[in-house]
Amino acid sequence: MNNMKLLSAQQIREWDAYTIKHEPIDSIDLMERASINCVEYISKKYSIDQSILIFCAKGNNGGDGLAIARLLIAKGYLVRIYILEMGKIGTNDFQINLHRLHAYTTEIHFIQSVDALPTILASDLLIDALYGTGLKDSLKALSKDLVDTMNLSGAEIISIDIPSGLCVDHSSKGNTIIKATTTLAFQAIKLCFLAAENEAYFGEIQVINIQLLSEFLHGLPAIYSLISKSNIKSFFKPRNEFAHKGIFGHALLIAGGRGKMGAAILSARAAMRAGLGMLTVSIPSHTEIIIHCALPEAMVISRELNSMNFERFSTIGIGPGLGTDKGTEKLLFTLIENYKKPIVIDADALNIISNNPDWISKIPSDSILTPHPKEFDRLFGVSDNEFERWEKAIHFSEKYQLVILVKGHHTLIASNGKGWFNINGNVGLAKAGSGDTLTGIITALLAQGYPSSLAALLGVYLHGLAADLALAEQSTESLLASDTIEQLSKAFKELER
């Protein structure tokens, strides 16, 4: 999964430098290569009569903008260039491209004050080449005024590599940032594109291959990575034809309560669809008939402590629709005190633990916690932004030897001080029952013998893939958790190809 690593801003700069040294290629020629690929995208999407305004600062991102301007003019586009003048000389590559550009146009303007900001029409196409991945601080003064003007124009904006004002590897919350229609990201997805708090800024992401040398990534340490299909297939275990149900585990699912038996049904159905050999569902007494009718493949026991022989189960999932009464609290405490194998903890079980924070250290090692952001904050403290929440998940996964999911559009799986983001799935999963379904899937995979981190990775990936496959028949609005469960068969087949 080397090519799926999410690099820091410093590592991105080092990747450029490595390519320049080892290809070898001059930095100005690497800039030209990147600009040619950007122009190829722009010229395919926009007609020759499109009015284009390109905004550059004096760094290398601005140098990209100047090269793009020259190449577009050579193709016959009407281009005006605006350079943000902050009283500093530009980088060497910026200066070279500015010199080259003078041979093509006189439409080069310098913005030295608010009075020099141009009039922008909604029909214009704006190219944002102000600040790249090296930005560390928020935009101020004239830079901020220019970005505000661009955002208010109503024009389409293409950002080169990253929207100006957005930081690669830490939060930009509260900052002034370009609201791009499209971002032409060089070579790879950036960490900042995975944060929901940044959704308004990057628009549609197009990864532009600028042929940075992949050898740089070999052995490169990275805290965060993306989950890829090839990575999942590398550890996915297709079934042996002579296998029997005992090989695929016997899980206990402790779920459901008054008015929330649907959570137990969804979680149980998902567990069976995810390949579990046998399932026992622990539910309140006198509700057995609900499970028997909804899922005849499952066994049922009522939720009394004296009937709970935890040790006979391969693993245990607890939480969906459970409730937080004193009896349930006592049951959860008994479980984590006495059961030594990894378990899956979700929903109300997490809420009980958040009210008893000293219990976290009692949870069996390698257990999987599946909180959504609010549940996570109740467990580990309120975070000011997503980057802080991700960092906490990484920290606490290592501190407590747990696998911690932070559920969201791009769910993070934190394990042993590393994190993986899932990028499949769709907004149809933002609906009641999706979390219950995921808990069932992960519980089933854990029971089948997958190590905890791999069970979580595979479970999240299958869940997202099944939701995507369901869109062949459903819309994101109509998608139900039960639709996702029904598509798990196709998701498994995708991995077997």
Image (spheres, rainbow, N blue to C red):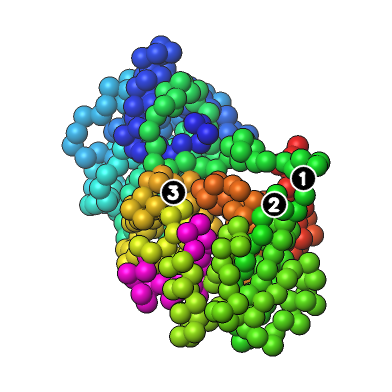
Return the x and y of residue 55 as percentages of the image width and height.
38, 40
Q: Residue 122: tell me if it is visible.
A: no
Q: Which mark is residue 415?
A: 3
Mark 2 Cα-neighbour bin, 10 Å: few <14, some 14–19, many ≥20: many
Q: Which of the marked residues, 2 or 3, is nearer the chain's N terminus? A: 2
Instruction: Write the residue at 74% across / 64% down.
Output: 483
Q: Label 2 amino acid?
A: Phe
Residue type at the position of mark 1: Ala
Q: Magenta stretch containing residue 380, yes or no?
A: no
Image quarter of residue 220: top left
Q: Is residue 187 left or right of residue 491?
A: left
Image depth: mark 2 or mark 3 in front:
2
- Distance of label 1 from label 3 (alpha carbons): 30 Å
Q: Which residue is mark 2?
A: 248
The verdict on residue 356 being magenta is: yes
Q: Residue at x 38, y 72 (%)?
A: 354
Tell me the tag on residue 243: 1
Q: Residue at x 66, y 72 (%)?
A: 281
Q: Over which residues does the magenta segment extend?
A: 339-360
* Inter-mark Cα distance, 1 to 2: 8 Å
Question: Are the residues at dot 2 and dot 3 in contact (C-beta closer than 8 Å)?
Answer: no
- Give the amino acid at mark 3: Ser
Residue 350 lies, in percent from the top left, at: 46, 70
Say what secondary structure mark 1 lies in.
loop
- Residue 206 seen in the figure: yes
